[in-house]
Image (tube, grey):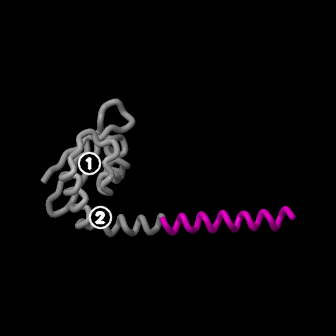
Amino acid sequence: MKLTFYVQGSAPNPYELIFNIHDTLTVSCSCPAGEKKTLCKHILRLIEGDTTGLITEQPDNVDSVCTAFLASDAKNIYDEWKHCEGELDDLKEKTKNIKRKFSKALFK
């Protein structure tokens, strides 16, 4: 099954997102990042169920994309990525607190 969506991005013309759902899930987006075959916010939003910028509401098709994503091998990698982002946020907070302590130790 091939599902096509149009989303309004920063360019005057909408970007085209294509989701091919067969044995695997493959995606493409006509935005600059998508053209380079790198993850773009348009693809990420849609697989997360976020319809921000979507020109035509297609709830059934969005649901199909989300369902296909959840069943794909990419879902495990996505979960690992989100877990790492959470750890990174924790480390940034810890680093900020340590820098604050360090500053207080130096400027008594």
Does 55 appear above or below 45?
A: above
Q: Which three-letter amino acid code belongs to the residue tagged 2?
A: Ala
Residue 106 belongs to magenta span: yes
Residue 95 belongs to magenta span: yes
Res. 8 image quadrant = top left
- Figure quadrant of the C terminus: bottom right
| Residue position marked by numbered label 2 in the rendering | 74
**Residue span colored magenta:** 86-108
| Residue position marked by numbered label 1 in the rendering | 28
Res. 73 image quadrant = bottom left
Q: Nearer the viewer, residue 51 or 42?
A: 51
Residue at the (32%, 69%) spot, across then down = 76
Residue at the (58%, 67%) spot, across then down = 91
Q: Which three-letter amino acid code belongs to the residue tagged 1?
A: Ser
Residue at the (25%, 40%) spot, across then down = 6
Report whether 53 appears left or right of 88.
Answer: left
Helix, strand or loop for disc 2:
helix
Report whether 82 appears left or right of 96.
Answer: left
Residue at the (34%, 53%) spot, across then down = 44
